[in-house]
Amino acid sequence: MNAAASRYGTAVTRVAASTAPPSSQRRDRGTLRCYTGRLLTSLIIAIDGPSGAGKGTLARRLAEALGYRHIDTGAMYRAVAWKAHQIGLPLDAESELAELAERADLRQEGGRITIDDADVTRAIRTPEMDHSAARVARLPAVRAILVERQRALGDGGGVVMEGRDIGTVVFPGADVKLFLDASAEERARRRAHDDAHSGGQQGSVDRLKTDMAARDQSDSTRKVAPLQMADDAIYVDTTGVDADEVFARVLALVTEKATGEL
């Protein structure tokens, strides 16, 4: 086990380098026809990991390639936190926040995230919402409600779901479990160049590194559904690896799983 993976308390199975399927692949009725000529089934693909590891980029690309639905579970906690701010609800009011999480109309469609018809796609991607979502995510009653909703969204398969507890809590029986990670420096550098998460303060890598370390500590030590790597997850270190290569490797892995070769 390497030092990075050991933080998450399980052994490491690394994703092996592989060749991306040929460009002649085509989608057919919501699935991807792979080079073996067989169709991918409706899998549940779980992608976990800390912020800045590349979960969102990979999940969106996989979902598009496979014709699957992409669910960003972190956005659900962010949306609830945003709504709480809007109505003046304290972030430590657990029962009231759980009620809000249960009754809210939460949707993720076409890359847009809405709560009660309000488009919060950009509003929830700010440093303030980073901190607020972490606080909301530590509340057991809120997690119970949102996990139930997440299971309902993905139960039929054909989904790529990203978060911090998908492979361990939401879908422990997922067909493919991935745990994305990267060095602290790499993750901070990525966020420093992401206006939505850095607040436009480009170059503040040290500050972001400190903030992300605090979030990691919060996520990995919370009593309910802490950030951990599932025992049967495949560890993917994205440090120094561009998004295209990560996508190619993981798509080949998913294809092997779907065709019974993994």
Image: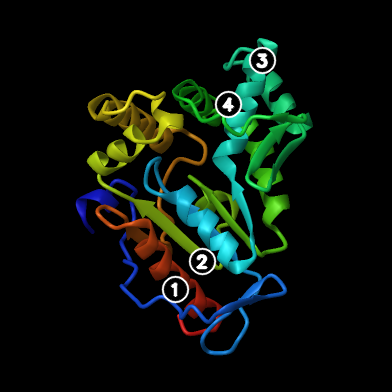
Residue labelled with disc 3: 86
SS category of the residue bearing label 2 = strand
Q: CA distance from mark 2 to mark 1?
A: 9 Å
Q: Position of residue 28 (x, y in %)?
A: 68, 77
Q: Residue at x 48, y 79 (%)?
A: 256
Q: Which sits earlier in the primary sequence, circle 4 or circle 3?
A: 3
Query: Answer yes or no: do the residues labelled 2 and 1 have beta carbons within 8 Å?
Result: yes
Q: How does the figure colour the protein chain or chains?
A: rainbow
Q: Residues within 10 Å of mark 3 (few under 14, many from 20)?
A: few
Q: Given the image, on which type of amino acid does mark 3 rest?
A: Gln
Q: Given the image, on which type of amino acid does mark 4 rest?
A: Ala
Residue labelled with disc 1: 253
Residue labelled with disc 2: 176
SS category of the residue bearing label 4 = loop
Q: Given the image, on which type of amino acid does mark 2 rest?
A: Val
Q: Residue at x 42, y 35 (%)?
A: 219
Outermost residue, bottom direction?
A: 37
Pair 2/1: label in front: 1
SS category of the residue bearing label 3 = helix
Q: Which sits earlier in the primary sequence, circle 4 or circle 2?
A: 4
Q: CA distance from mark 1 to mark 4?
A: 34 Å
Q: CA distance from mark 1 to mark 3?
A: 42 Å
**Left or right: residue 148 compared with residue 72:** right
Q: Residue at x 63, y 45 (%)?
A: 111
Q: CA distance from mark 4 to mark 3?
A: 11 Å
Q: Quadrant of residue 16?
A: bottom left
Residue labelled with disc 4: 123
Outermost residue, left direction?
A: 3
Pair 1/4: label in front: 4
Q: Which sits earlier in the primary sequence, circle 1 or circle 3?
A: 3
Query: With respect to residue 160, does 103 lie above or below?
Result: above
